Amino acid sequence: MIKIAFVASEAIPYAKTGGLADVAGTLPKVLEKLGCEVKLFIPKYFTIDESKFNLKYNWNIGEIPIMVAGHIRSVHVLQSKLPGSNVEVNFIDCPHYFHRAHFYTNDIDEDERFILFSKAVIVALQHFNWRPDIIHCNDWQTGLIPLLLKDNYSWDNLFKNTSTIFTIHNIGYQGKFSKETLTKAQINERYFYPMGPVEFYNDVSFMKAGISFADIITTVSRTYAREILTPDYGAGMENILLQRKEDLYGIINGVDYTMWNPETDKQIPFNYTLNSLSEKAKNKEYLLKQFGMPFKKETPLIGIVSRIVEQKGFDIFAEVINSLLNLNAQWIVLGSGEDKFEDLIRWLVNHYPEKVGAHIMFSDILSHLIEAGSDMFLMPSRYEPCGLNQIYSLKYGTVPIVRNTGGLADTVRDWHYSELSYDNRGTGFSFDSFTGNALLDTVKRAIKTFGDKTTWRRIQTNGMNKNFSWEPSAQEYIKLYKYVIGK
Ligand code: ADP
Ligand code: GLC
């Protein structure tokens, strides 16, 4: 039985800002179902409700001292089971670092928070005396673990046969800190030199450390795995990735269809299937009402649920906003992020209340309602490692309009734009060039097609019949685990 310590900075149902949480809260369960033994590790953020999730203090371990930035911090482990599974969840609790307003901060000790987390995971494993075959790390917050294991903790035989996997969910967030971070983390200075394994333009990068020291690197779609080897998408990491190209794999994320299925979704008022799409229209009516907008059956409703940041293409959206507003469509936006885009969206809602509705916030229930009630779903991302909302959209008969990049390219098939896609198998609409005009043309194309009920129904059917469940992807991870264990 493969033993996996799965380490991430967020996981549903406890803490979520984006897709990483969906992955970290679901993949471990599926791995367990497929015969692995999995322990999940996440920080115990202030907002994680101890009684709701029945977290228990681990008295066998008690308080463990962890040294960060020259101070000994006291850490303990709270434990629970991932709902619907036997996966043990370990919450690393250190109020000094994790009891803050947000999971991620710009505080001056942001580096220390995840140094502590990474060290505490390793020390907790020692206290459990549990010998993982694999430590599966995710994104920069866990990037130091492979290095710590290979160097600082190499004395411990417990990890003699432990391999590390580092999954990149987003190369745009690199965990960059000044050189002092080396001392704070007790990282050997010999790794810090120009172009060296932890050095990134004179700073320390946790992401680069993960890429340099992990035995295997993965990312969350095949296309993104290719893209990040290029200067346009590598965000400066392309060279180190090229050096490790042989060890880089792309595995597409799956979906937990027990949560994201219009037939059974408990968070939407009207459940539906392919054969009862009239119920979908009722969700639309309900959704528009929630946003104080008039219901117009024949006018397509375009939904957006997103972190409102440049990555997601809001700059090209803003560029053509006037033309978009002239189209016969209504818009609903859910999300929060950069001020300039939030301000634009608020302005739109104020000036076009019948056309644009928005909630600048994070709301799980609204995200489900928007998936169920919208006719189309827009994701014009500059880059998209995987993207989950477009995959949810397919299942909800909510036709995705996406830029052809990363996981969007791997999951959405364009309807009849190029000759190549003229096969009636399309599931959405996509465009290549990252420009406002390409976005505008594609939205126009979707709206025009919406008018043709038979074709629209066909596109919805194609999408709703798609299956992106986790099992095949989890199998691919298991194959990699076995490969690296045998190496
Ligand atoms: P990313 O991880 O880059 O933000 P993904 O598409 O992979 O993008 O995942 C985003 C996840 O977060 C989805 O599950 C989506 O429904 C959810 N999400 C994003 N913004 C919000 C929001 N404002 N409210 C609720 N859920 C949100
Ligand atoms: C990141 C990416 C997103 C991906 C998610 C889960 O946040 O931006 O594309 O789906 O991680 O892997």
Image (cartoon, rainbow, N blue to C red):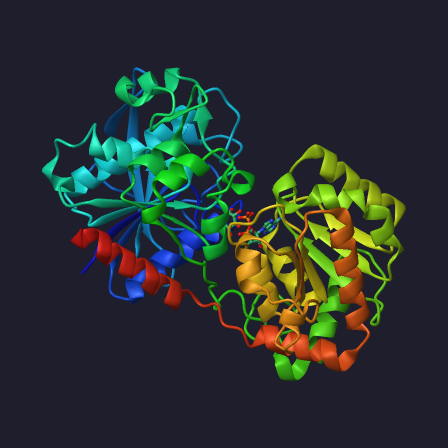
**Quarter assignment of residue 391:** bottom right
On the question of residue 30 being in view, the answer is no
Residue 106, placed above or below residue 365: above
Front one among 467 and 118:
467
**Quarter assignment of residue 450:** bottom right
On the rendered structure, is 54 left or right of 299? left
Judged from this view, the residue extending furthest toward the left is 157
Residue 303, placed above or below residue 71: below
On the question of residue 18 being in view, the answer is yes
**Quarter assignment of residue 307:** top right
On the rendered structure, is 473 left or right of 333? left
User: Residue 23: image x %, image y %?
Assistant: 44, 54
Front one among 365 and 411:
411
Residue 137, placed above or below residue 207: below
User: Residue 34: image x %, image y %?
Assistant: 28, 66
* The N terminus lies in quadrant: bottom left
Residue 234, placed above or below residue 181: below
On the rendered structure, is 11 left or right of 125? right
User: Residue 277: image x %, image y %?
Assistant: 68, 79
Front one among 78 and 460:
460
Q: Residue at x 43, y 50 (%)?
A: 52
On the rendered structure, is 151 left or right of 357? left
User: Residue 16: image x %, image y %?
Assistant: 50, 46
